Image (cartoon, helix red, strand yellow):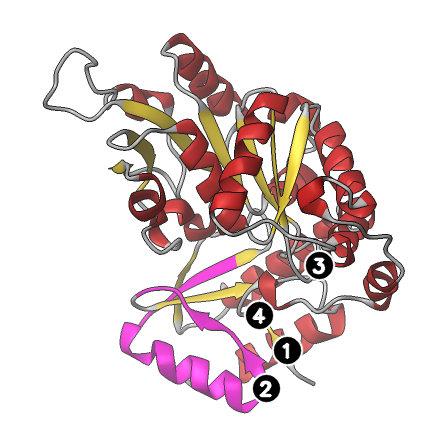
Amino acid sequence: MRIDLRSDTVTRPTAEIMDAMSSAKVGDDVFGEDPTINELQEFAAEMFGMEAALFCSSGTQTNQIAINVHVTPGGEVICHEESHIYKYEGGGIAKNSGASVRLLQGDRGRLSVDQISKWINPREDVHFPLTQLVSLEDTANRGGGAIYDFEEIKRISTFCKENGLPLHLDGARLMNALVETGIDPKKYAAEFDSISLCLSKGLGAPVGSVLIGTKDFITRSRRVRKVFGGGMRQAGIIAAGGLFALKNNVDRLKVDHDHAKQIESTLKELNWVKEVVPVQTNIVVAHVVESGKRDQIISALKEMDIHIMAFGEGMLRMVTHLDVSSEMIDALCDALRKLKV
């Protein structure tokens, strides 16, 4: 029995998703004529109470399009130093948009309004780049799936509005946060100018993300998507998987969170584990007592067909998802207890 906990991106489409994709109605999306893509975009926009949405091939693409629309070359983006838009998108902020970044430290990948307010560059001083965008990530991947305090998001949003700054959200795992907190998606989205939402992680679609915002923002984003080579033709075949996932796989994310907490509880029992980052959603991060044994642990589990990944010096990461059953979690916890480290 293969147990793959490296990421929630390894999910394979269920039979229901495959059926939805194989029977999808399609058209030319560059002409705006793919009915399934149009339905997905309308559904996503309505879910978050925003005017429009744009289907793209990946979360990196939706993030990079948003940044490109919001900033001009030479501008500056404020984000956490561990944020995905900076750390894992191939230098796209610089390459695609010619912008610089102001990297801030924060609590488990999360920023506060007090931190952000200190780094707004003076517009009248030509020595500094113009601060043009603030970007948050919820949940925070590098923070072990940490959820933002919504009250802090509202404070950040108010500050950005007062200072004429757009606020973008990398919501790769946003639905995990909303399922856990119970916050209404419309209420949450009202604090942001744009939101990137992945369909291919815990929601289980094989590919795709949506970018959500105002009609004007999405019109401009569609042009940038074309420039980035992201215009797709009869892509309703893949959009159907995302539409099914968004309609049917949101509530079940809570199961992944429960599984992650079960792993957390087991890890806390083990004498070779120094610390477990408090689990809030579907990501489990553990620090081992002897950091040099990290790879030994990964290899030992791999021999049992259990796959996890390194997450930094002396750190292990496990991510639960819809391909991981309760039986698999029990088997993993049993293997962890028996592991000789």
Instruction: Name above or below for residue 248 compared with residue 125.
Output: below
Q: Is residue 315 left or right of residue 229?
A: left
Where the C terminus falls, by quadrant? bottom left
Query: Which residue is denoted by mark 4 in the rendering?
Result: 5
Could you say whether the residue bearing mark 4 is in a helix, strand or loop? loop
What is the spatial separation of the Cα atoms under label 3 and label 4, in whole angstroms? 14 Å
Picture residue at 75% right of the left edge, 74% below the top:
327
Mark earlier in primary sequence (2, 1): 1
Residue 47 in sight in this render: yes
Could you say whether the residue bearing mark 3 is in a helix, strand or loop? loop
The mark found on residue 204 in the picture is 3
Query: Which residue is denoted by mark 2 in the rendering?
Result: 305
Return the residue nearer the eye: 277 or 160.
160
Mark earlier in primary sequence (1, 3): 1
- Check contact, mark 2 vs mark 1: CB within 8 A: yes
The location of residue 209, given as percent across then percent down, is 62, 48
The location of residue 23, given as percent across then percent down, is 89, 60
Could you say whether the residue bearing mark 1 is in a helix, strand or loop? strand
What is the spatial separation of the Cα atoms under label 4 and label 1, in whole angstroms? 6 Å
Mark 2 or 3, which is nearer the eye? 3
Q: Give the range drawn in magenta.
A: 284-312
Mark 1 or 3, which is nearer the eye? 3
Mark earlier in primary sequence (2, 3): 3
Q: What residue type is labelled 4?
A: Leu
Instruction: Name above or below for residue 122 compared with residue 83.
Output: above
